[in-house]
Amino acid sequence: MYAVRRSSKRSHAPCCDQLSALNSALLAACPLVDTGVAEMRGGLLFILFVLAHQPLVSHAASIHEAAMKGDVAAVAAALDAGADVDESDGKAAPLYLAVRGGHLAVARLLIDRGADVNAAPTALGPALMPALAKRRVDLITLLLDGGANPNAYRNREAALHIAVRSGCLDCVKALVSAGADVNAKTKDGKTSLHLAKFKAQREVADYLLSHGVVLPTPAPISNKLATADVEKGRTAFSRHCAYCHNAKPDEGSNEGPTLWNVVGRDKASVANRRYSEALLAWQGVWTYEDLNKFLLEPMVTTPGVYMEMPGVPDETERTNLIAYLRTLSETPIPLP
């Protein structure tokens, strides 16, 4: 379980109290005898208000600039002068800026002074994200030790997905050791293992496989094919397959290989087609149960495949689709 660090925020109440006291004093010293005196008092109050708030603006500006530059002394001075350790400059807090700049000492100082390691005021996400993008294991470890969420998301992907995309095995190890979910998916269904295999990052893939990756296996459907609805399977083909695959050998080219004669055909065997390493490594012919497994969720059951589609999770629809695929042949394979 990750911890959320909190810091005390500055209050403007003292300034308001001082202005209230000054206003009372001015009212006593300058009774409203004419318009000129009232205007004078209003002008004085405005000047005092601006002066009272000016240090806050200076502190905020200086701490963000110092964090970006990696100036430890300037950051410490700004904090000592009352700057808010978590104040955003409109895009990011000082900790994010320090990490993005690769400034370990400043990042450590800000965390020690109470910076929220999980603050994500904008779509940029928390400070962990630039640390991962820079492949800085020292910064990643500092943030995780300080309570950063190893399962934090930025936009459509989690921290582990970013680490895997970068190919940084040590970054992946740091996140997994801190509790990152190795089975988490991006918003479009990609797992960390799929990303690793898709990019041929064998060491990363092997590490993930040895640290809790689950490859789902659907229940058998062969005994249900005889009663499947082939016409509904045709509809399922149009919905899930027709965009990339043809149903007949003479229907022209398409992105994927034709599915004519797919049942009983050797995997990855259609000429002049480029296949993923994952599919090339899966030897044998396409059996009913192989199709059942593959179509369930290709990127999860067969990580690294080029067919990056959600799959057909509903068993009945998947069974109907496979029954239809069986008919795409002059001599369909016998039913079980």
Image (spheres, helix red, strand yellow):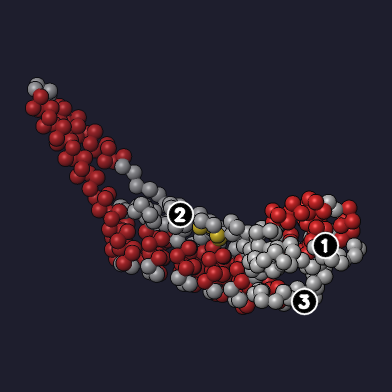
* Residue occupying image coordinates x 27% and y 37%: 16
- Helix, strand or loop status at disc 3: loop
Q: In the rendered image, which residue does mark 1 sit on?
A: 326
Report whether 71 appears left or right of 153.
left
Q: In the rendered image, which residue does mark 3 sit on?
A: 283
* Residue occupying image coordinates x 26% and y 41%: 15
Q: Of label 1 and label 3, which has the lower sequence position?
A: 3
The 10 Å Cα crowd at callout 3, few under 14, some 14 to 19, many 20 or more, is few
* Residue occupying image coordinates x 76% and y 54%: 234
Q: Which residue type carries mark 1?
A: Arg
The 10 Å Cα crowd at callout 2, few under 14, some 14 to 19, many 20 or more, is few
Q: Of label 2 and label 1, which has the lower sequence position?
A: 2
The 10 Å Cα crowd at callout 1, few under 14, some 14 to 19, many 20 or more, is many
Q: Does residue 65 sit above or below 57 in this rendering?
A: below
Q: Which residue type carries mark 2?
A: Ala
Q: Nearer the viewer, residue 277 or 10?
A: 277
Marks 2, 1: nearer the viewer: 1
* Residue occupying image coordinates x 82% and y 70%: 264
Q: Nearer the viewer, residue 168 or 219?
A: 219
Marks 1, 3: nearer the viewer: 1
> Could you tell me if the residues under marks 1 and 3 are in contact, i.e. CB atoms within 8 Å?
no
Q: Does residue 156 sit above or below 200 in this rendering?
A: above
Report whether 78 appears left or right of 181.
left
User: What label does residue 123 carry, if any?
Assistant: 2
- Helix, strand or loop status at disc 1: helix
**Can you tell which quarter of the image residue 77 is in?**
bottom left
